[in-house]
Image: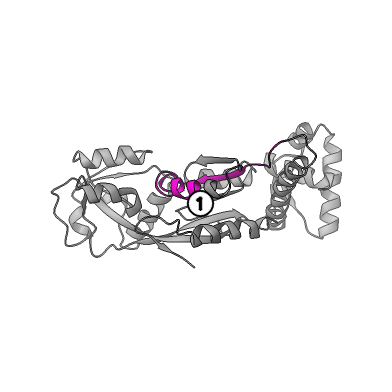
Amino acid sequence: MLDHRTHTFLAAYRTGSFTRAAEELHVTQPAVSQHIRQLEHHYGQPLFAKTARGVRPTEAGELLYRALDSMENDERRLRAELDALDGEKSARPPLRLGCTRTIADHVAPRLLAGHLSRHPDERVLMRAGNTHELMALIEDGEIDFALVEGPFDRAALESAPLSREPFAAVAAPGTPRPAGLADLLGHRLVLREPGSGTREILERHLAARDLTVGDFAGVVELASIPAIKACVRAGVGVSFLYRVAVADELEAGTLADVTPPDLRIEHNFSLVWQRGSRYGERYRALLRTWRSRGHQARGGTITS
């Protein structure tokens, strides 16, 4: 059970104000200040610095927040598991996971179908979003872990790789394969919205060549992978997507592979969860089961 001062600290961190934390917790502002002073005395470090608008966490406060937020989320799940033991609830807490959109559409269906065939009584709640959205859901305790394709905050999250996945540049059928990346710059680029893991990875590789998405003839931003593929198929422009997301279209010939030889990209699909969670080994065990059952993205490589 977490100490009441822990909840005070977390509220102050999230609101950025001792006054708003007091209102949220229905206590007085001096009580909040006292709780924070007690924690600072216990840890021997200042946890907040005053600002014109409230307070901001110090480096020690940031470190403490990551640890206590994980403990708070673990406590909620533990309480739900304990409640399920007393007969008042008929089922264990659900498996709450998030998936980035490529994984949600092209990898998770196989993963979850196999998982539920082995655990038919388990409830599963899956949320889809971009990497940044899923990280926020983990921090807020809305989901327990996520399968992501993009870069993530390794200070806040632990991870283990599921598979290694190749990128593909795709265009309308009949588009010739380029000799190099420069040959694609005359096309419009159809890509995901900012915050998407797919987009971030592409932008990083472009930056390594002193390029940006703005160096293409134009940019079309779409938050839907099916919409991106439909536009590319219609000749609107080129796109860069994980091969698993376009495997069916490449096989059917409705999209052409125009991956330039000087832009070969591979990236991990990773399982991520809150750093310090007591459930970390449970998530690792689940991932090992998924790997051992061969549930991998088509065209990807299982990572051991």
Name the residue carrying label 1.
147
Secondary structure at numbered mark 1: strand
Residue 245 placement, left or right of 85: left
Q: Is residue 66 magenta?
A: no
Q: Quadrant location of residue 211?
A: bottom left
- Please, what is the three-letter code of the amino acid marked with disc 1? Leu
Q: Label 1: few (<14), some or many (≥20) within 10 Å?
A: many
Q: Is residue 105 magenta?
A: yes
Q: Quadrant location of residue 160?
A: bottom right
In the image, what residue occupies the spot 79% across and 34% down?
A: 25
**Image position, residue 107 (x, y; %):** 43, 50
Task: Please state which of residues 111 and 249 is positioned toward the viewer in this rendering.
Answer: 111
**Image position, residue 133 (x, y; %):** 52, 43
**Image position, residue 168 (x, y; %):** 29, 55
In the image, what residue occupies the spot 71% across and 36% down?
A: 90
Q: Quadrant location of residue 264?
A: bottom left
Residue 293 placement, left or right of 119: left
Q: Which residues are magenta?
A: 90-114
